[in-house]
Image (cartoon, rainbow, N blue to C red):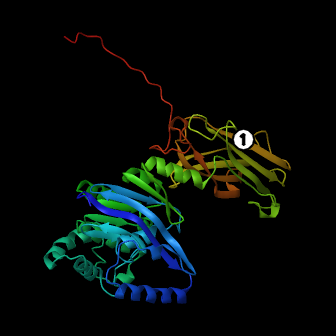
Amino acid sequence: MNDDVMIRCDGVGKKFCRDLKKSLWYGVLDSARDLFRRRQPMIRRETESLRNGEFWANRDISFEIKRGECLGLIGRNGAGKTTLLKMLNGLIKPDHGFIKVRGQVGALIALGAGFNPVLTGRENIAVNGAILGLSKQQISEAVDDIIDFAELPHAIDSPVRNYSSGMSVRLGFAIATCIRPEVLIVDEVLAVGDADFRLKCLKRMRNVLKNGCAVLLVSHNMTDIRNMASTALWMQDGKCQAIGEPYKVVSEYLGTSCSDTAEIEWEDPSAAPGGDSVSLRRVAVLPVDINKPISISTGAKIQLAFDCHELGLRLGFTLEVCTEEQIVVFHTGGSLTPNGDSVRANYNVDVTVPSFLLNSGKYQLSVTIDESQCIALVHVPNVVTFQVGHESLGVNHAQLPGVVAPKLTWKCHTNEQSLI
């Protein structure tokens, strides 16, 4: 293996059995076969077949991560990401293919993994450091840095079982990164941390990348993947669906999670959001041109349909559009009955989102209908999810940096002077 390659997976596969009794029996058979086999090749033909009740959690996964590179691993829950990480960390072994990991590994693949809940945080630092092969002197030198990064000076001598999930993540990430690992494996555990600590962790990962560490990052936050990863791998049903440049892979992944138009309709009035006064019938985000997907240059149309069952209401509405990370892009509203009080009727509202406002990406729409802008009659957060693409890139859902994409007017002025 090349000296710069820190992690290499070649045709890796892992299978499990859904039935507990069969799983235990298969484990005994596999252990006995490995015990009496004098020479076991890295890839065995018999491991390619499934026995009764088995399924492939991972299948034919191949990739390499070099020094200073970050591989972003994405996919829906149950796609096989955590199984792959456990094999990379040596917790379980593959049934097919082989894995090669070089150097000291810092892994954070489960909340509180490797911690003894009875021991204090300081004692767990010593235990984890010893497991990683550090000497007492090295552990002693790293303790203050770990405690400072984890921001746990007042709780470090308390049992870990008394820690919150966020405190456990702080301590785990601090241990995994303060030992100066050559390989860093991070699962979606950072999602439970607060915003400031997440930014602190991302900054730490950038630093370890600059120092030549190979990082494997699993996240459902596509912004982190786009900003951190040099390569992205999309897993689906245990297989590698796509691997390559992060923006393209993330765009392809998000393009499968929702369509170009987002629409929800309640045919049964009793199931519709609202109450006796007002009930929502339909919410849709549509392209301006029905023959094209929603794009930066075209904008979009938001349509509301609702029924008003009570006379004399002064109705207003509020629309809120957020990114997938719940960053509010805009929050706007208006009056639905500008000429007076409402009547019993079916109302239809069209709102145009201008072109060159929303950047490419995935957005969520929340809808509120109120009376006199104070009493919410209908409130549906994140009622629909929609995509905005970028036509010029040839990929409808191509992800570009930033939240908005304004069309700016550029002027260039020159001062004529002699350049001699």
Relative to the observer, which residue lies in front, 41 or 209?
41
Q: Is residue 50 above or below residue 196?
A: below
Instruction: Specify the amino acid type for callout 1.
Output: Asp
Q: Position of residue 126 (x, y in %)?
A: 23, 80
- Crowd class of label 1 (few under 14; some 14 to 19; many from 20; radius 10 Å): few
Relative to the observer, which residue lies in front, 202 or 74?
74
Q: Position of residue 398 (x, y in %)?
A: 51, 44
Q: Position of residue 20 (x, y in %)?
A: 54, 87
266 to the left or right of 181: right
Relative to the observer, which residue lies in front, 36 or 188?
36
Q: Is residue 207 above or below residue 50?
A: above
Q: Is residue 317 above or below residue 16?
A: above
Q: Is residue 388 above or below residue 271?
A: above
Q: How many marks?
A: 1
Q: Which quadrant: the C terminus?
A: top left
Answer with the quarter of the image where residue 1 lies. Answer: bottom left
SS type, badge 1: strand
Q: Which residue is mark 1?
A: 350
- For this orientation, the residue located farthest to the left is 137
